[in-house]
């Protein structure tokens, strides 16, 4: 099956975008994995799919599949690319669009300066909804909130990683580190991602606080490995930093692939939405022959 696609990136987190507004390709998990493969397919961290809105109050539906082919609840950098895509393709002329995602609905705005602002909705702290199973874990009080001491079984022995847990529709575990450049992302990331306390696995964020309005972040993403930026991860990290009493309400997040700005008034209202602003770039368009893969 020959499929047209658009390659996009948001702060270095890269995507294959598929237009299913006029019909579906009916791709299997293996075919999504093929599209994301950097040697045999196009190559991407996630595959984004544009579909017509399921209900009149929405403008589109937005599906996200990780590089491993699994469908997930939300993708922040992808959301910014999504709104640039639907404008560039003439699928809408509305500067702000409301989009259904697996984890709920989000609002996307294309700004005059070319950056994109996304209302990512309110963070979720309910452990069952995350989902996070705290059985056998004792929370550690930290700055008026809490972290959970995950035991990680490293070759050199067991270490404890105290993580803050929060959902942006998708699950995140945030670990404070002194220096992101020397943080054990490759070693600890996969162990946190697949830790038994996370029944649906988790995205693992490594957060360095520079000051109350600037942080550095690396994320070992569920189903994709370390990416150059993670939008929901940036939201989750800033939310955790604010709840731990370490950050102000607007924070610049420096990821390896670019800068995102996150704002959350959670110090006053935990149900406040998280607003994320950042770049969204179209890299190229193409077509690819996708083999029949069950
Ligand atoms: N790996 C994530 C999905 C993509 C999130 C990330 N690319 C973003 O920009 O939010 C998950 O499994 O929940």
Image (tube, rainbow, N blue to C red):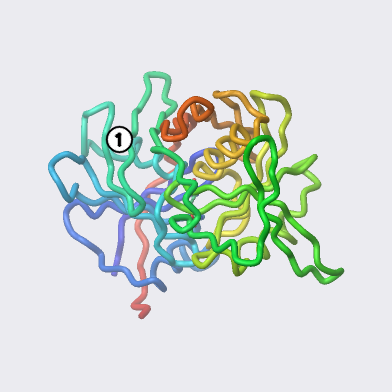
Q: Pointer 1: residues within 10 angstroms few (<14), some, or many (20+)?
A: few
Judge from the rendering whether residue 179 lies leftward or rightward of residue 238; answer left or right. Answer: right
Q: Residue 104: x and y, percent?
A: 32, 48
Judge from the rendering whether residue 43 lies leftward or rightward of residue 99; answer left or right. Answer: right
- Hey, which residue is sitting farthest right in the picture? 156
Q: Is residue 221 above or below residue 97?
A: below
Q: Is residue 220 above or below residue 269?
A: below
Q: Which residue is mark 1?
A: 88
**Residue for point 32% across, 49% down:** 101
Q: Residue 186: x and y, percent?
A: 72, 58
- Hey, which residue is sitting farthest left in the picture? 56
> What element does badge 1 sit on?
helix
Q: Quadrant of residue 287?
A: bottom left
**Residue for point 46% across, 41% down:** 123
Give the number of callouts: 1
- Hey, which residue is sitting farthest bottom in the picture? 294
> Residue 142 or 233: which is nearer the viewer?
142
């Amino acid at each position: 099956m020959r499929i047209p696609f658009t390659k996009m990136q948001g702060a270095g987190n890269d995507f294959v975008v598929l237009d299913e507004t006029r019909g579906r390709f009916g791709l299997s998990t293996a075919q999504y994995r093929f599209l994301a493969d950097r040697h045999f397919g196009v190559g991407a961290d996630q595959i984004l799919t544009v579909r017509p809105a399921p209900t009149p109050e929405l403008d589109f539906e937005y599906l996200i599949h990780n590089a491993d082919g699994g469908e997930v609840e939300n993708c922040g950098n992808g959301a910014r690319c999504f709104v640039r895509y639907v404008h560039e393709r003439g699928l809408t002329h509305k500067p702000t669009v409301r989009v259904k995602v697996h984890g709920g609905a989000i609002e996307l705005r294309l700004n005059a300066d070319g950056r994109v602002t996304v209302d990512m909705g309110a963070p979720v702290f309910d452990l069952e909804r995350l989902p996070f199973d705290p059985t056998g874990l004792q929370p550690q009080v930290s700055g008026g909130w809490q972290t959970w001491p995950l035991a990680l079984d490293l070759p050199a022995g067991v270490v404890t990683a105290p993580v803050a847990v929060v959902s942006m529709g998708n699950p995140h575990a945030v670990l404070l580190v002194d220096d992101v450049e020397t943080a054990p992302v490759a070693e600890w990331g996969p162990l946190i991602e697949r830790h038994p306390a996370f029944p649906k696995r988790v995205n693992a964020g490594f957060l360095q606080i520079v000051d109350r309005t600037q942080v550095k972040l690396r994320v070992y993403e569920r189903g994709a490995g370390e990416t150059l930026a993670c939008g929901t991860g940036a939201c989750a990290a800033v939310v955790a930093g604010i709840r731990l009493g370490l950050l102000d309400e607007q924070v610049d997040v420096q990821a390896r692939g670019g800068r995102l700005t996150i704002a959350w008034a959670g110090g006053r209202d935990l149900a406040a939405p998280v607003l994320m602003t950042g770049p969204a770039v179209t890299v190229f368009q193409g077509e690819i022959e996708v083999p029949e893969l069950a």
